[in-house]
């Protein structure tokens, strides 16, 4: 066999094209075999292959890349690589004429959300032929609707002579890629004129012809046994911009008659049914990974996972499992279940302790036989790379009574040499951790079932990938090289929190992660694809730069963007601001500041917490000079006065004009939101003006190009790691480069009308939302629609008059008819997805919704110790039986054209 690859691609001196063939090594594993191509002019590249890798038999997947000085400079879009079927008998010679594939504008059409959930067409092998001389046409046609097939029709009799009934049907050989093998000897001319046409499965009544001019291909001179393969420009059909509606709800918030005080994967099946029954196409969840570190309610925070792979044991649906044979235990646990399931909110500790007790009893009863099954063995083999360390981590966490592995007497990090005994069923080590294998097998089996059920119903399950991981979690314990433990990830001040957010997560060691092509992240995304067809990147800004907070800080005001281009003393002074390191980088504590902050308590503060420095300037005593030390000093003191003093001391620590760079001591960052601090107030007016100019340049201009390149080192690898539809949460302090990258990678943005990205308007204009976006009114971090309506009457009044075009005073509380109007307007936006929280959907029905709107809040970001325990107040069975509400949702979706 001879394969001649040809491609036209303009390179510059020092660059060369490389053909990369993707070879399957084993299930889920591939290797790349590369072939350097030849050129005479730097534009036309060729490569001849006479022997293929052993794993390539009847089909070859491949892509092109540009090499410079031995390293890959750029590559094609690889979500859908080129595919060559060797379908012609007698091992002929193939002449392949390819086109370079850049990421298409409609890349979303290639996502599993569209191919596997919406269109649901299955690619097929190209039928074998026995032509002596073959012509193959290959074209991508992502615009085809569900139920349409692609045909080729042309002027020659071999293509039906423009007669639709004699057009030649093509085969979808890859998602949205169609091909057909033609007998070259049947053509009457070497210049072939043709067009593509889409026909429905139900006949030729409404053919969809290409809107372009006719296509032409010049048939080369072919010898016997030769095939010419032409990859053509994408088919020219009208855009098919599908718009879909959906619901956001955490799994833990679901409630059914059968659940155990918390939503589970069985309830998820019922929720999928509700979404499908109301004409919606998307169900968005919060993270479902295990977060167990303390076995207390503080583990309820779903964005603090201990493993990027393990699922939370609370989500096991016990009704899908064998019943307990011990009748007394079964009745006792059923009584507890009924009690927990009637609570208005989740009792996290009792729910998880009781479900764990149930699972341990079931493990003793069923575990031995279940773990002998072929299904379990397959699961263990596929997931052992993370499952074995995770199980040992959980065992040691519980044995030593803490998740802080630095405090364990041994096993302070994962030891790979222990993998074998932990994987061998006859060993003591295996028996000690087997329960955790058992539970994760149940979870994976049930969640995969839910995913399959969603696809069968045409529903896109959308997951959530948190930006951080727990600093005491299994991921950090297993692969500590990927993390910086001397800092904390968070977010700068925003509408959610005036002091910023401190999530407590370790920051990533991106230098180390980039050394292996972000393999940790790729594995994480690929594991998500087992359960979801779309995902939300939580805090996508973290891939550009993360807000890194010193480990000794409690709030986020002393953070700095990392990485970022800090400013030198010379740069600061070049703006016209004389730089005083002591005055600008140490807390500014003057007599007048203390009087303003503490009033009559100022003397007490001086005597207890401060020492005199000079003139009217003070400094904090060493035992109180960080927020962590202050927090420890006030531990256990809960009087309102004590908390007021503690927060005042926190504010003193934050009162600096510049923050020293954590990795380059000679570089400085203007402290975020310092315009509200006393050190800024103490500046001369001319210095304030200079500082403001410096501040705006630093935060909004200085780092744009730098952060763009930082993101482009990471995100392309992750976006192309799976075929899931990529969405991102891009709210907050967003630099210009974020939009550049998201547009370049075709990532869907998040659009919230109450948080417009245009600083010149108070509310976003729904009609201006881009198609490639997700529209919502509230997220899990925000007040619900009903809460938002009542928390600021002046703002609501302006929204009522300017966005809803209604006169007179806005009614309070929000009536159902007006909530319906607001919801419909959201649905009418151009956004591809309009995903509303379950609470906002229920706001339209005054008889159905919860009377207390404040009880519907999921999270309050300003409170780092928030208890995540919201649960829907009625069962899913009751929700689906409420015909007026289901009909109203269906009608709204239908009215909006979604």
Image: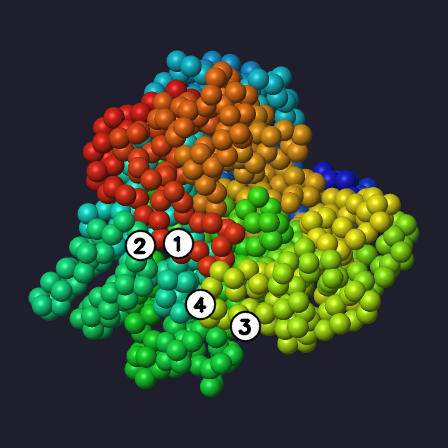
Residue 665 falls in which quadrant of the image? bottom right
Q: Quick check: marks 4 and 3 in contact, CB under 8 Å?
A: no
Q: Which comes sooner in the sequence, label 2 or label 4?
A: 2
Would you name the residue on which mark 3 appears?
Answer: 632
Decide which of tag 3 and tag 2 comes sooner along the chain. 2
Going 40% across and 81% down the picture, which residue do you hit? 400
In three-dimensional space, the C-alpha distance between marks 3 and 1, rounded to whole angstroms, equals 25 Å
* Position of 250 relative to 583 (above/below): above
Label whose residue precedes the other's in the sequence (1 or 2):
2
In the rendered structure, find residue 413 and report the number of the disc placed on it: none
Image: 884 above or below 655? above
- In the image shown, does 738 or 816 lie closer to the viewer? 816
Can the viewer see residue 454 in this picture?
A: yes
User: Which numbered disc, 4 or 1, marks the residue that appears first in the sequence?
Assistant: 4
Residue 287 rendering spot, x and y as whole percentages:
43, 53
Drawn side of residue 12 relative to residue 435, left or right: right
At numbered mark 4, what does the secondary structure look like: helix, strand or loop? helix
In the picture of the structure, the residue carrying the numbered disc 4 is 386
Q: Residue at x 52, y 79 (%)?
A: 406
Find disc 2 in the rendering and name its residue: 346
Quadrant of the image occupied by residue 521: bottom right
Q: Earlier in the sequence, mark 3 or mark 1?
A: 3
- Residue 868, numbered label: 1
Contact, CB < 8 Å: mark 1 with mark 2? yes
Q: Nearer the viewer, mark 4 or mark 1?
A: 1
> What is the x, y in percent for residue 895?
39, 20
Quarter in which the C terminus is drawn: top left
Q: Earlier in the sequence, mark 4 or mark 3?
A: 4
Q: Residues within 10 Å of mark 1 (few under 14, many from 20)?
A: many
Q: Secondary structure at mark 3?
A: helix
């Amino acid at each position: 066999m001879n394969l001649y690859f040809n491609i036209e691609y303009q390179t510059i001196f020092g660059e060369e094209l490389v053909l990369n063939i993707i070879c399957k090594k084993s299930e889920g594993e591939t290797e790349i075999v590369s072939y350097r191509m030849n050129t005479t002019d730097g534009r036309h590249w060729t490569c001849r292959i006479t022997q293929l890798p052993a794993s390539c038999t009847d089909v070859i997947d491949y892509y092109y890349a540009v090499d410079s000085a031995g390293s890959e400079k750029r590559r094609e879009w690889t979500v859908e690589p080129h595919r060559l079927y060797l379908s012609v008998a007698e091992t002929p010679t193939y002449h392949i004429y390819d086109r370079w594939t850049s990421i298409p504008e409609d890349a979303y059409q290639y996502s599993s959300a569209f191919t596997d959930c919406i269109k649901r067409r299955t690619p097929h092998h190209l039928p074998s032929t026995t032509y002596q001389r073959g012509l193959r046409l290959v074209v991508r046609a992502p615009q085809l609707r569900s139920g349409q097939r692609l045909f080729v029709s042309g002027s020659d009799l071999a293509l039906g002579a423009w007669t639709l009934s004699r057009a030649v049907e093509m085969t979808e050989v890859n998602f949205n890629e169609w091909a057909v093998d033609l007998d070259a000897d049947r053509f009457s001319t070497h210049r072939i004129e043709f067009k593509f046409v889409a026909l429905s499965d139900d006949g030729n009544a409404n053919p969809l012809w290409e809107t372009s001019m006719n296509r032409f291909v010049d048939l080369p001179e072919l010898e016997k046994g030769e095939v010419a393969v032409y990859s053509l420009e994408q088919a020219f059909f009208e855009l098919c911009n599908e718009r879909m509606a959906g619901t956001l709800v955490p799994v833990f918030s679901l409630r059914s008659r059968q659940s155990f005080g918390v939503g589970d994967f069985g309830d998820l099946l019922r929720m999928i049914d509700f979404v499908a029954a109301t004409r919606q196409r998307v169900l968005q969840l919060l993270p479902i990974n295990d977060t167990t570190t303390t076995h207390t309610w503080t583990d309820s925070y779903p964005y603090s996972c201990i493993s990027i792979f393990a699922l939370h044991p609370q989500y096991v649906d016990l009704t899908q499992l064998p019943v307990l044979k011990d009748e007394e235990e079964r009745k006792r646990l059923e009584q507890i279940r009924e009690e927990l399931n009637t609570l208005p909110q989740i009792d996290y500790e009792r729910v998880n302790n009781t479900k764990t007790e149930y699972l341990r009893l079931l493990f003793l009863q069923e575990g031995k036989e279940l773990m002998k099954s072929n299904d379990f063995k397959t699961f263990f083999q596929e997931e052992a790379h993370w499952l074995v360390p995770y199980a040992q981590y959980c065992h040691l966490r519980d044995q030593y009574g803490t998740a802080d592995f630095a405090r364990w007497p041994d096993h302070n990090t994962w030891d790979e040499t222990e993998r074998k005994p932990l994987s061998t069923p006859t060993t003591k080590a295996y028996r000690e951790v087997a329960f955790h294998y058992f539970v994760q097998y149940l979870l994976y089996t049930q969640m995969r079932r839910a995913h399959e059920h969603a696809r069968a119903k045409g529903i896109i399950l959308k997951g959530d990938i948190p930006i951080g991981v727990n600093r005491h979690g299994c991921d950090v314990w297993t692969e500590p090289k990927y993390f910086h433990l001397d800092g904390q990830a968070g977010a700068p001040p925003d509408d959610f929190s005036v002091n910023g957010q401190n999530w407590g997560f370790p920051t990533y060691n991106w230098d180390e992660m980039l050394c292996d092509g972000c393999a940790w992240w790729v594995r994480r995304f690929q594991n998500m694809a087992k359960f979801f067809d779309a995902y939300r990147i939580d805090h996508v800004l973290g891939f550009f730069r993360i807000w890194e907070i010193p480990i000794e800080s409690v709030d986020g005001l002393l953070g700095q963007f990392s990485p970022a281009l800090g400013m030198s003393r010379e740069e600061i002074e070049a703006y016209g601001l004389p730089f005083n390191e002591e005055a600008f980088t140490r807390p500014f504590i003057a007599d007048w500041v203390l009087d303003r902050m503490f009033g009559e308590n100022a003397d007490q503060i001086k005597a207890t917490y401060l020492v005199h420095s000079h003139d009217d300037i003070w400094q904090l005593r060493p035992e109180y000079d960080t927020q962590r030390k202050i927090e420890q000093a006030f531990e256990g003191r809960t009087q309102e006065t004590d908390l007021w003093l503690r927060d005042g001391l926190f504010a003193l620590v934050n009162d600096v004009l510049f923050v020293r760079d954590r990795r380059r001591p000679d570089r400085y960052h203007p402290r975020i939101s310092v315009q509200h601090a006393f050190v800024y107030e103490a500046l001369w007016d001319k210095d304030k003006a200079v500082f403001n100019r410096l501040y705006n340049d630093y935060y909004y201009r200085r780092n744009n190009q730098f952060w763009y390149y930082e993101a482009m080192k990471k995100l392309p690898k992750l976006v192309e790691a799976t075929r899931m539809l990529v969405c991102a949460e891009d709210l907050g302090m967003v630099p210009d480069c974020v939009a550049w990258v998201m547009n370049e990678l075709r990532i869907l943005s998040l659009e919230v009308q109450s948080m417009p990205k245009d600083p010149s308007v108070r509310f976003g204009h729904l009609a201006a939302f881009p198609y490639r976006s997700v529209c919502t009114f509230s997220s899990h971090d925000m007040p619900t629609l009903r809460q938002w309506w009542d928390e600021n009457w002046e703002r609501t009044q302006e929204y009522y008059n300017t966005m809803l075009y209604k006169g007179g005073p806005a009614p309070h509380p929000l009536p159902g008819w007006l909530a319906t109007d607001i919801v419909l307007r959201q649905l009418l936006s151009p956004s591809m997805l309009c995903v509303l929280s379950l609470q906002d959907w229920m706001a339209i029905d005054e008889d159905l919704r919860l009377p207390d709107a404040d009880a519907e809040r999921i999270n309050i970001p300003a409170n780092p110790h928030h208890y995540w325990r919201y649960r829907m107040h009625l069962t899913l069975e009751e929700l689906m039986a409420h015909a007026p509400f289901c009909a109203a949702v269906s009608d709204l979706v239908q009215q909006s054209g979604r």
